[in-house]
Amino acid sequence: MVFIQEPYIIHSRVVGITKRYRTFTSTIGRSRTATVITNNQIDALLIREATDKDTVVIEITLENLKFYMVNMYLDITEKLDKTIEQINDILQLANTRGLLITMDSNSRSRTWHDKLTNGRGKRLEELLISKQLFIMNEDSEMTTFQSTRGSSYIDLTISNYKLLKEVQEWKIIEEESCSDHKIIQFYIGQYNAQQAGSEFQSIKYVVREENQRKFETLITQEMAKQMCGSRRGEDSRILDKCISLQIAYKEDMEDIVSKFSDALTAACDKSFKKAGTHMKTQTQNGADLL
């Protein structure tokens, strides 16, 4: 599962996510949160009455584990009154079930390892304490947010007591996120890095200089095949023009991303040798947070 705050929006729609995955977001207003589920074994139900442009609430069921997953964006220009009311409503909805909240809080507090506490942070801190909600963030040399304006720990992972022991291995990832915010990763459920629930093949390619020219030719051909139905051997300039026109006038960006992904895989398969590496992953209660 991937939890995104401030996703890319075009024509009031979240874009850049392949249609192969289930994307949950509000259908009203310009969404500032999106939850993506890549694992078909996870049963997810969007709670529409609790979802808006800044909050996505999903009921998650996976075997004997059932809980509510909440993804929130807190606008720094707005007071926390609405957030407090929403969290109260969500707590009533969850009742005695597990609850996990991923949040861009735009609030700072030493409670979640920031170097200072501001007014918003103090109020949010008091709310979480009064509702017996727990901050799952762990102290780290890396901050969750970093820009030219400074750095802070404004991104939070919050749990109620039901899921307190289920959230494991919380960490900030060094990998580039193409955002001011860092990628945060954690696991839900009984996860052991040495014991895999399932296994998948992570494909790596041996990229050699002599194969790069072949790849550059094939990626254009494969993309044209996906976008224009063009066949191999046609002039590359014609293919480039066809692809450019399709991208310029096509509104369904998710479809373009999906087709580019297929074209990229096909071009790599035909150009480079594979160096397969087996990686372990938990399919039963695993979650990645962005």
Image: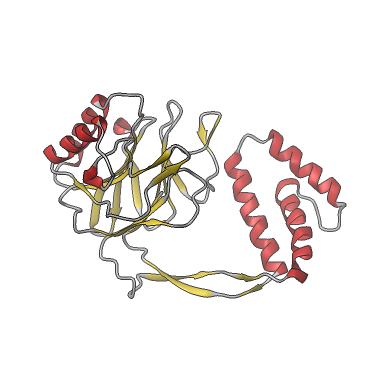
Looking at the picture, does residue 49 appear above or below residue 264? above
The location of residue 13, given as percent across then percent down, is 51, 33
Q: Quadrant of residue 73?
A: top left
Name the residue located 23 percent from the left edge and 25 percent from the top edge. Answer: 81
Name the residue located 46 percent from the left edge and 28 percent from the top edge. Answer: 30
143 or 189, nearer to the observer? 143
Looking at the picture, does residue 21 appear above or below residue 197? above
Q: Quadrant of residue 155?
A: top left
281 or 41, nearer to the observer? 281
Looking at the picture, does residue 113 appear above or below residue 252? below
144 horizontally vs 161: left or right: right
Looking at the picture, does residue 252 appear above or below residue 278? above
Residue 288 visible from this viewpoint: no
Q: How many marks?
A: 0
Name the residue located 29 percent from the left edge and 66 percent from the top edge. Answer: 191
Name the residue located 33 percent from the left edge and 32 percent from the top edge. Answer: 74
196 horizontally vs 30: left or right: left
The location of residue 75, given as percent across then percent down, is 36, 29
167 or 89, nearer to the observer? 167
